[in-house]
Image (spheres, rainbow, N blue to C red):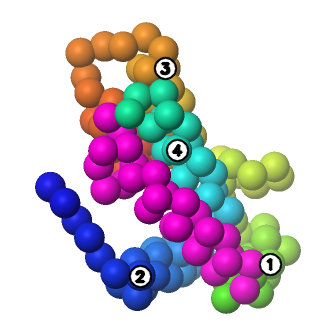
Amino acid sequence: MDVDWDFAQENEADDFALKNTLDRNYDVQEVPKLYVAVSQAAAVDQRIGLGFLGNKKRVKERTEYAKKVLETQLKPDYEKKLQAAQLVGTSPGLPVDGGGAEEGLSDLFSHLSHPSNQPPGVILGRGLNLT
């Protein structure tokens, strides 16, 4: 299935997701790490890059956009929540919320190293669902 949205729609969706994530006190600095993990997984198993979420060009664009939003629009709110110790995540000094994406991505990389009968997309989806 080919899903092709324009930049404005992608940016609007990312703005909503990043703000919503921060509003719920999750560390939005994890988002670029998630994109790096998806990119690494696609390098190991090219099937991951065939889908919308793993598309190399899209991952690069979304990573750059997320970093820009985190460094500008969301920075003041992020800094306030960080200073108030309200954030949950895997960055140093933050409480961890049950493993989240890192646990799911760890499962994905483990799967790629020791393949099972489950497709990598299912494992990746499980990791994304945890976030």
Q: Quadrant of residue 115?
A: top left
- Name which residue lies at 29% across and 49% down: 51
- Name which residue lies at 48% across and 27% down: 44
Residue 11 position, x and y percent, is 46, 82
* Cα separation between marks 4 and 2: 20 Å
Label 3: which residue?
110
Horizontal side of 82 relative to 107 (left or right) equals: right
Residue 28 position, x and y percent, is 62, 66
Q: Are marks 4 and 3 in contact (CB under 8 Å)?
A: no
Lower sequence index among marks 1 and 2? 2
Task: State which mark lies toward you, 1 or 3.
Answer: 3
Q: Are marks 4 and 2 in contact (CB under 8 Å)?
A: no
Label 1: which residue?
79
Lower sequence index among marks 1 and 4? 4
Lower sequence index among marks 3 and 2? 2
Label 2: which residue?
7
* Cα separation between marks 3 and 2: 33 Å
Q: Label 3 is placed on what type of residue?
A: Ser
Mark 1 Cα-neighbour bin, 10 Å: few <14, some 14–19, many ≥20: few
Q: Dot 3 lies on which element? A: helix
Q: Quadrant of residue 76?
A: bottom right
Task: State which mark lies toward you, 1 or 2.
Answer: 2
Q: Label 2 is placed on what type of residue?
A: Phe
Mark 4 Cα-neighbour bin, 10 Å: few <14, some 14–19, many ≥20: many
- Name which residue lies at 67% across and 88% down: 73
Quarter of the figure that contains the N terminus: bottom left
